[in-house]
Image (tube, coloured by chain):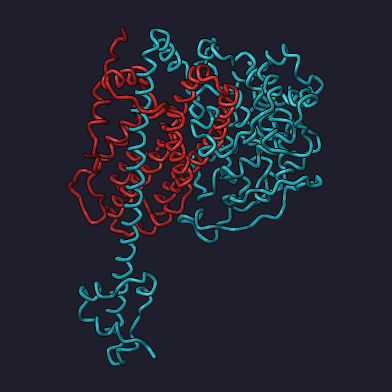
Amino acid sequence: MKFGKRIKEQIQESLPEWRDKFLRYKELKNLISSAPAPAESIFVGLLNAEIDKFNAFFVEQEEDFIIHHKELQYRIQRLVEKCGDNEEMFRLEIGEIRKDIVNFHGEMVLLVNYSNINYTGLAKILKKYDKRRGGGIRSPFIQKVLHQPFFKTDLVSRLVREWETTMDSVFPAKVAEEGYERSAAVTSAAAGEGIFRNTVAALLTMREMRRGSSTYSAFSLPPLNLSDSDLVLRSVHLSSPIPIP
Amino acid sequence: MTLANDFGYSTTMSSSFSALHPTVEDRYRKFPNSFWVSGQELMNNPVPCQSVSGGNSGGYLFSSSSGFCNVSAVSPHGRNSQTQPPVSTVPRDRLAMQDCTLEAQSSSLINHHQPQEFTDPLQEFFDFSDHVPVQHLQAEESGVRVDSSVELHKKSEWQDWADQLISVDDGSEPNWSDFLGDPRSHNQNSEIPMPFSDVPRQEIKANQQHQMVLSEEQLIGRNASSSVATSKQRMRWTPELHESFVEAVNQLGGSDRATPKAVLKLLNNPVLTIYHVKSHLQKYRTARYKPETSEVTGEPQEKKLTSMEDIKSLDMKTSVEITQALRLQMEVQKRLHEQLEIQRTLQLQIEKQGRYLQMMFEKQQKIQENKSSCSEASPKQCNDTSAEVEFGLDTRTVEQAESPSASRKRVRED
């Protein structure tokens, strides 16, 4: 599957504010193919500008996440204290917070995804450039990319995992999962476009991208192993909201 | 004992819950949650100027009014049913401030005699919201300064932005030209949890000492000769730093009373600029006033809220389904994240491998050159084992590929 197509789909599915923050893969690709091929300094300059864009966006999002992370913690804290032993009241309000947790988690994951997609795109575009120009700028350039802020997703990943841990505390103990299909329908009805769809799209994209390609080499990633892929597929295929009786 | 323990909060959350005295708790229950927040924060972060005991502290705590905009927003049952003003057409920041203006006039608990703090920040927000995106463009790391349209756009906004800053809070601001033209170096990741102390308020000059570190991060493809004016440096926040920030803000009386300059002084962090603090403070305020929007995207939660609410009101049983749905969503997200991490690790490995191969290749070439150029010299003098040392790898694999020169590699210089 072509990366260009995939990144385009990703962008389409992504949250609106993000759409112009991705790598301009297609434009760069066309630029490389054009005659005459761009000089190295120019091309590198363009890539650096893209990287600046990634960094700016990523760091700002990260900052927002940090703030929100704290706020969400406080909210839960407040709620727990407010309710004390009053389970009824707790249950009523926790629903909103649960939703926020899941969505917040999703947004953070999407940022990690953003980072990854752009990195992958850069690697590919550099490869294309070298192929066209017969040069060797890919390797040293990519080395430097590895040290860029947007690539260093450790903090966000850490927060992501923290909320995964918190899930058990905030969500009720797992009941027998009957009516799984129905609940998935509710999800797609309620979430619609937005974080969930974006996430699913991202996963599918990843799987596609890692299927064997014509240029499979030592530098290529192995095929994606999505056990439970039916989990993903099920959520995707329920496209039409089922009316709730 | 309490719900908190049942849900294991004390282990999963970073701060611990203090069991409050019943009367205090009752008192707090009368007030909306928002006020509770400031009280709670202040209690969990004991600082000299706060009094935590029941009676007298009431007035002080609530005058902090950090959450006054939430007065109408929170009630136990009505949370989902409150009518939110239409969000879709109005920028988030502006909307939040509009709400606050109304509330400010109606609530009697708010300090009126600080008009400067209220109106100016509000004004600042109205004007500032336009500049928020620009601000971060300006603050981005200095890569190579390509004369793209982005660059030009940035520069044209500087003047407006500078004017805005001048009109804000206390009058004794340092020279703005210092900020604008300050050839600052690149920022650091600030990972130092700032020791929070009541330092005597000293002026922080614009040209304070920085660690002038040009890390490799900022130097992609750049010539060593090009110097960059970096008053636009970007700050990378950490949770620890943010916590210190929150403490400072609380000490100054809450997010509305705290001014960027005061916070900056309290934090006493050499890497932070007032510029960073200012933008962070604004984000912080926004996040607190609008806890119910999808925080980063500003995407109106309304859509989701409405559909969730409809479902909820239809039948209580469906709340189980909603929970199930959320679980499903979480699972998918979790999966994606796992895969991303794996992918990243692989990509790093690939690059490392590639680097090694490259190095070996270059070494091989060099050896070939040496071989031809020093054919009369002793083979010993043509050795170079630095690559192997760097990677700490077994040379056997390499030797298999380069058998002719294998023996030569083994020989070390005396």
User: Residue at image x 72%, y 51%?
Assistant: B207
Picture coordinates of residue B95, whole percent (x, y): 59, 18
Q: Is residue A103 visible?
A: no
Picture coordinates of residue B414, whole percent (x, y): 39, 91
Question: On screen, B86 above or below B351?
Answer: above
User: Residue at image x 43%, y 32%?
Assistant: A167
Find chain B in the image and tell me its colour: cyan
Chain letter, colour red in render: A
Question: On screen, B266 above or below B132?
Answer: below
Question: On screen, B216 above or below B127?
Answer: below
**Which of the image's four quarters has the N terminus of chain B?**
top right
Compared across the picture, whether B369 is left or right of A146 comes to: left
User: Residue at image x 68%, y 21%?
Assistant: B28
Residue A225 location, quadrant: top left
Picture coordinates of residue A27, whole percent (x, y): 34, 39
Compared across the picture, whether A139 is left or right of B400 comes to: right
Q: Is residue B217 visible?
A: yes
The front one of A78 and A42 is A78
Compared across the picture, whether A79 is left or right of A29 comes to: right
